[in-house]
Amino acid sequence: MKYVIGVDSGGTHIVGQALTDTGKVLFETQSGPGNILLDETGTYQNLTTILTTIFENMPQADCQHVLIGIAGVETTGNATEVANYFTKKFEVKVDVISDAQLALLNGLEGQDGTLVIAGTGSVVYGRQNKKMMRYGGWGFLLGDTGSAYKITAEAMINALKAHDLNQANSLIEPLINWLDATNIKQAVQKYYQLNRKDVASLAAKIAELAEKGDQTAQQILIDQATALAGEVLGLIKQYHAPIPERIAFSGSVLVHNDFYRETLLQQINHVYPEIKGHVVSTNNGRGAIFWEEWQ
């Protein structure tokens, strides 16, 4: 059976998939991490492991193409070099793009449109007439609008403001408990000891409160979804008419939080009612089956 290989090489791990032309996963393996900017040698080694493992389990002669999306490759600028290395090593055609391009390719199934990613961080990507666009994604200190990190940070800020004003706030007690503290001051101390991912992980708990009807938690989500919608609209304004109507949602915040996602889409539809959104539930390696659409 003929197949293609899609490899999503990200900062924490790498996923490699052998796929039919309809996207059925024939074989999957993982390794990692795979950010070539942070660890070039390790990324080469881990990608080699991925492809070797696939070819040990799938007939190499039946592989038609390999597409690898690598974190950091836009900055290093060596996509062609990496592609040539693996093409020669495995004697199969290999193309290399960024992990963001792979996510866009998968999320939009090769078509023009917009991809919104909101997980630990956030970024908005777009593509029209073979031109890539980006808005945001400048990290948790300078960007990551509407991300899990920002949701937690804004909840802490909201609770602290209420504390300073000696006002009641439904988030104070949960935040103290989640941070394993005895009071708000100790909670702040514990908060500053957390890394970025640990801070972001608390956003799911805030979302749970919102689902139970907590109005303060709901407002935090509304405010962050509205802020992210502003970035989406900023990217859409860069399109030429007619604007692409497809928008894909990816990342834990958008995939698992219906209230947040619906709020975001409502804000976008207020300006562009024709835009239709859908959730990306597949690994981005699936983008390999749409590669020909971009050629």
Image (tube, grey):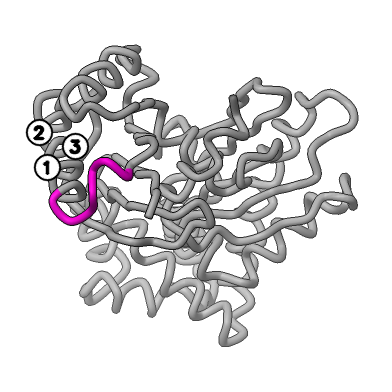
Q: What residue type is labelled 1?
A: Thr
In this rendering, position of residue 183 left or right of residue 21: left
- Tell me the residue at 49%/79% (across/down): 208
* Mark 1: secondary structure: helix
Task: Give me the C-alpha separation between circle 3 and circle 1.
Answer: 5 Å
| In contact (CB < 8 Å): disc 2 and disc 1 | yes
> In front here: 96 or 234?
96
Residue to which mark 1 is pinned: 49
Residue to which mark 3 is pinned: 47
The stretch of residues the image draws in magenta is 56-62
Residue to which mark 2 is pinned: 45
- Tell me the residue at 36%/66% (across/down): 202
Q: What residue type is labelled 2?
A: Gln
| In contact (CB < 8 Å): disc 3 and disc 2 | yes
Q: In the image, is residue 242 above or below residue 23? A: above
Q: In which quarter of the image is the N terminus?
A: bottom left
In this rendering, position of residue 144 left or right of residue 42: right
User: Residue 32 at x, y = what percent?
Assistant: 17, 45
Q: Judge whether residue 100 is colored magenta.
A: no
